Amino acid sequence: MLRRTSFTFAGSEQLDAPERLGVIDSLDSVLAPLLVEVATGEAAKVPWPPFAAPSLGVEHLTIPELLQRLTRDLPAPRPVPSSGRPGRVLDSGVEAQIHGPIQLEHDVVQLVADPSFRGTRTGECLTELCRSYGIAFDWHCGFRLDAVDVPEGFRGPAIPKLARRIASDGAVDAAVVGAAQASLRLRADAWRDWGTPEETSQQLKQLWHVLVHYGVQVAAGAASSPGDPASDHG
């Protein structure tokens, strides 16, 4: 699958994205802007100041440390997603796009889902999917944030209000944000008082950013067996 995957530093939606595009055998145009960002400390710019995301989500990253991480961590086995510290990368990274079909039985090794979908219809569908195709399934640590703790200065003053509007039991998580996005698409009339569908969808994305940056780790747990998330004791 790597042979039909393209890589873009930052986002492919940006006008200068072709200058930062590469394939697995030619990644110079992808790595060069990453090294420049790390060397200069000029991290990704975001729509709402004053926050500036660190490169790849790592504070004070240096080029020697980046190269050390690449040579040490990439060949190593992947850690259990539900244990350890959660990743909080937001505005910096390498986007990968797979071109052509993805065959679950041949192309997918593992599926990792947010624990907010435990016990939901979505979680049941993911479980059955992995069981049917012999795919390893695990939960990651998950994020949860009380609506009252959503700040105004991170992604804009409308985001705390949005969090309070959609919060379940006073908090937001991935399932809550996903349900709001589905509601916006299926029952747009219910959101007329809030703004246009495009504006609201963007604000839900910004709320997800807040959740990842500020959210409390839900739990850590053991790895599950293939297709059996129930064996995760998080």
Image: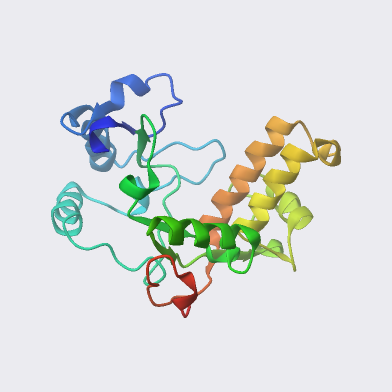
Q: Hey, which quadrant is residue 58 in on the image?
A: bottom left
- Which of 212/75 is in front? 75
Residue at point 69%, 51% (across, down): 179
Residue 157 visible to the viewer: no
Q: Hey, which quadrant is residue 143 in on the image?
A: bottom right
Left or right: 221 as drawn, with respect to 157: left
Q: Picture coordinates of residue 197 (x, y %)?
A: 73, 33
In the displayed orientation, state which residue is furthest to the front. 132
Residue 84 visible to the viewer: yes
Residue at point 14%, 55% (across, down): 68
Q: Picture coordinates of residue 61 (x, y %)?
A: 27, 52
Q: Picture coordinates of residue 31 (x, y %)?
A: 22, 35
Left or right: 108 as drawn, with respect to 190: left
* 21 up-or-down from 127: above or below: above
- Which of 173/32 is in front? 173
- Which of 166/3 is in front? 3
- Which of 106/200 is in front? 106
